[in-house]
Image (cartoon, helix red, strand yellow):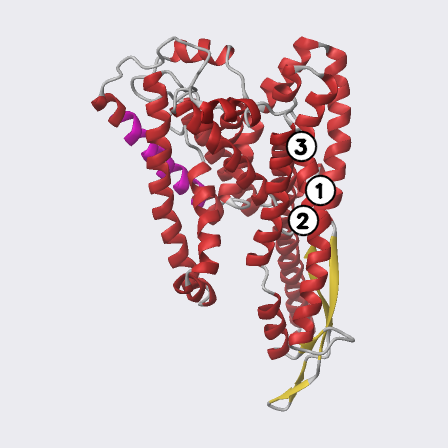
Amino acid sequence: MPRLLLRALRMPGIRKKLLFTLAIVVLFRFGQILPSPGVDVSAVRRCLSGSDGAAVDMLQLFSGGAMLKLSVFALGVMPYITASIMMQLLTVVVPRLEALRKEGREGQAVITQYTRYVTVVLALLYATTVVAMARTGQIFPNCRTPVLYDSSVPAAVVLVVTMVAGTCVVMWLGELITERGIGNGMSILIFTQVIAVFPSYISNIFRISPFALVTMLVAGIFLMAAVVFVEQAQRRVPVQYAKRMVGGRTYGGSTTYLPLKVNQASIVPVIFASSMLFIPQLAAQLMGGTGPVAEWIARYLTSGDHPVYVIGYFLLIVGFTFFYVSITFDPVEVADNMKSSGGYVPGIRPGRATAEYLRFTLSRLTAPGAVYLGLVSLIPILVFILLRDPSSQQNFPFGGVTLLIMVGVGLDTVKQIDAQVEQREYKGFLKGAAATSRAKGRFRGR
């Protein structure tokens, strides 16, 4: 990795992209610490120091600590990520969206525009909910200090408009990174949000015990290595292309493979399951925490070590992993495309038999992948159960979501940097060879 970074920095084009990405990330973090108008920053800090609970931790994680600070970029990339997942699910249900997906780049541009509209709607709902909780004091259940200077309706409208506008700016920043920087813009920003709270976790563990910090870092390195191993694992299905004669030329006859990853669904099932378990907690807070429903939620779904919470969280991840893989990878479509291109799996007949083979292979890969996602996501809860320390779950820096996002986005970004470096070096090699050939031609001409 250091050698790759040094090679990238030596190339002006890639160095410019890296610096541009870094500048956008700095601007994004500045917007996350910039308070919205009418927010009492000192009161927010006092309330944050005494807040705990699964809902608070989840908000801190997915917003990089910005949502509870009521900053300009308080919502971060949460509305966009949720909108993207919704559009992927709707693509299977709505025929119009499925037709757009099959149109290629133009259809994908229309779907992206729809995703932006859904993002604005979700941002409006999220911002209204957060501001309503801040006005009533429910955003920090254990703190009675008002966090807003003015709780009137006009002031609340200004806060909502500011947060929605901040979400639109975040979308624009993510697209700028994708177009002019390195890596996927939204992935880079969510990676920034996750690692933003990482130093606070490390400092909290160090205050508990330096030995605990060293033990945690060693365990984190082994966990990260295991996650990298599984994320890179794939089943390579061999594909043979038959020879074809087109215009007097022979095409095909090559052998390649179809990569099927063990974790085909990536981080999406974990985000979905976390959101699904967060919704009841949010509803209980909006109801004031009273009543049989709110008490049941507080008893079974708020405490992370309760068996109902653990089992429900695990089953949601496993179930949504199978569902998400089934809608993002269509074996019939892949088999038809393979057949139309003259490709086939050795020993398997093209068409329906190939589709059944791919479906069977994918299901066998998805089963361990779903269990892996569930177990990795339960790491903080398991640490809490083993240590019986309430602060261990909140301060554990190598939690499932954190670890998966850091490894997934990190690997994808490194691969893109490596690909661009190799491409530039290959172009430079061709230019050098062409220049040498021209020089030899001039010498022979003399």
Residue 430 visible at all: yes
Q: CA distance from mark 1 to mark 3?
A: 10 Å
> In the rendered structure, which segment of residues is drawn in magenta?
158-175
Question: Residue at position x 58%, y 44% from top?
Answer: 269
Mark 1 neighbour density, 10 Å: few (under 14) some (14–19) many (20 or more) = some
The correct choice, above or below, for 130 with respect to 174 in the image is above
Q: Please state which of residues 419 and 118 is positioned toward the viewer in this rendering.
A: 118
Mark 3 neighbour density, 10 Å: few (under 14) some (14–19) many (20 or more) = many
Name the residue at the front extreme. Answer: 292
Residue at which label 1 appears:
372
Indicate which disc residue 263 carries.
2
Query: Residue 80, how many percent across, how many down?
Result: 43, 42
Please name the predominant secondary structure of the magenta segment in the image: helix
| Secondary structure type for disc 2 | loop
The correct choice, above or below, for 16 with respect to 92 in the image is above
| Secondary structure type for disc 1 | helix
Three-letter amino acid code at the position of disc 1: Tyr
Disc 2 or 3, which lies upstream in sequence?
2
Disc 1 or 3, which lies upstream in sequence?
1
Q: Please state which of residues 228 and 119 is positioned toward the viewer in this rendering.
A: 119
| Secondary structure type for disc 3 | loop
Q: CA distance from mark 2 to mark 3?
A: 16 Å
Determine whether, in the image, residue 228 is placed left or right of residue 67. Answer: right
Q: CA distance from mark 1 to mark 2?
A: 8 Å
Residue at which label 3 appears:
378
Disc 1 or 2, which lies upstream in sequence?
2
Name the residue at the left extreme. Answer: 154
Quadrant in which residue 218 is drawn: top right
The correct choice, above or below, for 18 with respect to 199 in the image is below
Q: Are marks 1 and 2 in contact (CB under 8 Å)?
A: yes
